[in-house]
Amino acid sequence: MSLDLERLALNHQTTFEVTLHNKEDEPNRRADWMFFKITNPDGSNILISDSTPIYPNPDSYPPANDASTFLTHYVNDSAFYASRDYSAFLEPYPKYYFYIALLAMGDNADKLTNGADYYNAIIHPEFANINNWAHVAQFNEMGVGYEYYFTITSLKRIEVEVTEPSSLLILMSGLLLISLRKILGRQ
C-alpha cells in the first residue's frame, strides 16, 4: 500500500484523534494518491491504481475510481481503514479493489494506532480485536481473476526518501565534469 500524502489536498478532515482522506475532499476529485500492489498466493501480482485502463470510464457516474482512508486514535476506540476501488461500476467486470479494515475497542484499543497523524503512523494489527480483515479483487473484462479475504498479521512502515532537485543537479554536474575530463584527457 502506498499513500502519497503530498498529493492530497489540504482540506482533508483532521483532528487530534481522527484523520480522513477521500476523493470527495479533493478539489480535482483525484484518487491517484493511493495504490496497492498485492502478491497473490500463486505469485502473480495485482496493481490497483490509476495506471490500469478500465472500460467504461471509471470517472463516469456513479464513481468507480475512488480512494479513501481514515486513521483514528482514541483511548477505547482506534481504527485504520483504507480502500482503493478502480472498477467498471455499472458492469460486473472489470473490477479492481482492495479494502483493509482494522478496528480495536475497549482495553488496549489505543495500542492499535499511535495517533492519527499519517506522517508518523505506526499500526499494530495484533490489537485489532473487532475487525481485522482485507479484501482484494481483480477481474478482467471476461470475469477471470481473483477475489479473497485475509487477516493482517503485520504492517511495516517504509519511509521513501525523495531526492531534492539540488542534489540531482550536483550529481549531474559531477558526472558532466568527469565525462569532460575523460574527453579532454584523450586529446
Image (cartoon, helix red, strand yellow):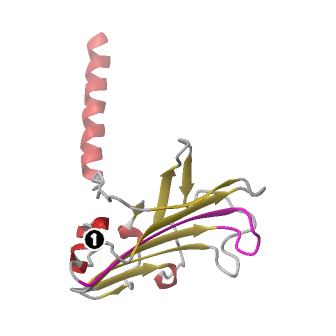
In percent of width and height, residue 7 lies at 41, 69
Image position of 46 with respect to 81: above or below: above
Q: Nearer the viewer, residue 141 or 61?
A: 141
Magenta highlight on residue 1: no
Residue 183 horizontal side relative to residue 138, left or right: left
Q: Quadrant of the C terminus?
A: top left
In percent of width and height, residue 2 lies at 41, 60
Q: Quadrant of the N terminus?
A: bottom left
Residue beneath the point at 30% across and 56% down: 156
**Does residue 187 appear anywhere in the picture?**
no
Image position of 152 with respect to 89: above or below: above
In percent of width and height, residue 56 lies at 75, 67
Query: Looking at the picture, which amino acid does disc 1 mark?
Result: Phe
Kindly indicate the quadrant of the structure image that contains residue 157. Answer: bottom left
**Does residue 31 appear anywhere in the picture?**
yes
Magenta highlight on residue 97: yes
Q: Nearer the viewer, residue 38 or 33?
A: 38
Q: Which residues are magenta?
A: 87-106
In percent of width and height, residue 98 lies at 53, 65
Kindly indicate the quadrant of the structure image that contains residue 108. Answer: bottom left
Residue beneath the point at 31% across and 85% down: 18
Kindly indicate the quadrant of the structure image that contains residue 47. Answer: bottom right
Image position of 160 with respect to 111: above or below: above
Secondary structure state at the residue bearing disc 1:
helix
Counting the numbered discs, the total is 1
Q: Nearer the viewer, residue 181 or 95?
A: 95
Q: Nearer the viewer, residue 112 or 4?
A: 112
Residue 63 horizontal side relative to residue 11, left or right: right
The residue identified by callout 1 is 127
